[in-house]
Image: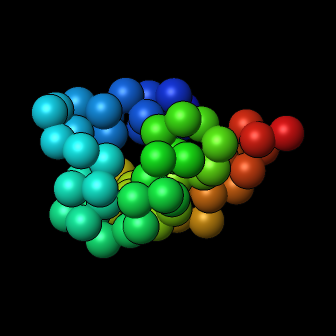
Amino acid sequence: MTKQEVIQLLKKKQAGQSVAALATVIGVSASYLYDVLNGAREPGRTILSYLGLSVTKKTIRNYAKLRR
């Protein structure tokens, strides 16, 4: 799954909620979630787990490669 696909999933989950409300549900800060939604930061384990995605070292390395 690409970073863009993760962002799309997050936006679906947001569905009418504020970023702050979704961040509270996920357990991350609103500023961090805002940055993820805007592509400025990588989604971490907490966000990936919330979305039901497998969190492995390979997944994290793949996101790191996409940053470059």
Give whichever of 2, 41 is nearer the camera: 41
Q: Is residue 20 visible?
A: yes
* Figure colour scheme: rainbow
Q: Identify the residue at image location x=60%, y=51%.
A: 42
The answer to whether residue 1 of the structure is visible from this angle is no
Q: 55 or 51, which lies in front?
A: 51
Q: Which residue: 29% across, 56% down? A: 20
In the rendered image, residue 16, in percent from the top left (x then y), is placed at 14, 33
Q: Position of residue 36 (x, y in %)?
A: 52, 46
Q: State the image coordinates of residue 52 (x, y, percent, origin top left).
A: 26, 54
Q: Is residue 17 left or right of residue 42?
A: left
**x 54%, y 35%: residue:** 38
Q: Residue at x 47, y 47 (%)?
A: 34
Name above or below for residue 39 compared with residue 31: above
Instruction: Check the image and name the residue furthest to the bottom.
Output: 27
Q: Is residue 27 left or right of residue 66?
A: left
Above or below, comparing residue 58 to residue 4 in the picture: below
Does residue 36 appear left or right of residue 42 in this picture? left
The quadrant holding residue 50 is bottom left
Residue toward you, 1 or 39: 39
- In the displayed orientation, state which residue is furthest to the right: 68
Relative to 38, 25 lies left or right: left
x then y, percent, for residue 44: 51, 62
| Marker count (numbered) | 0
Q: Is residue 64 above or below residue 39?
A: below
The quadrant in which the C terminus is found is: top right
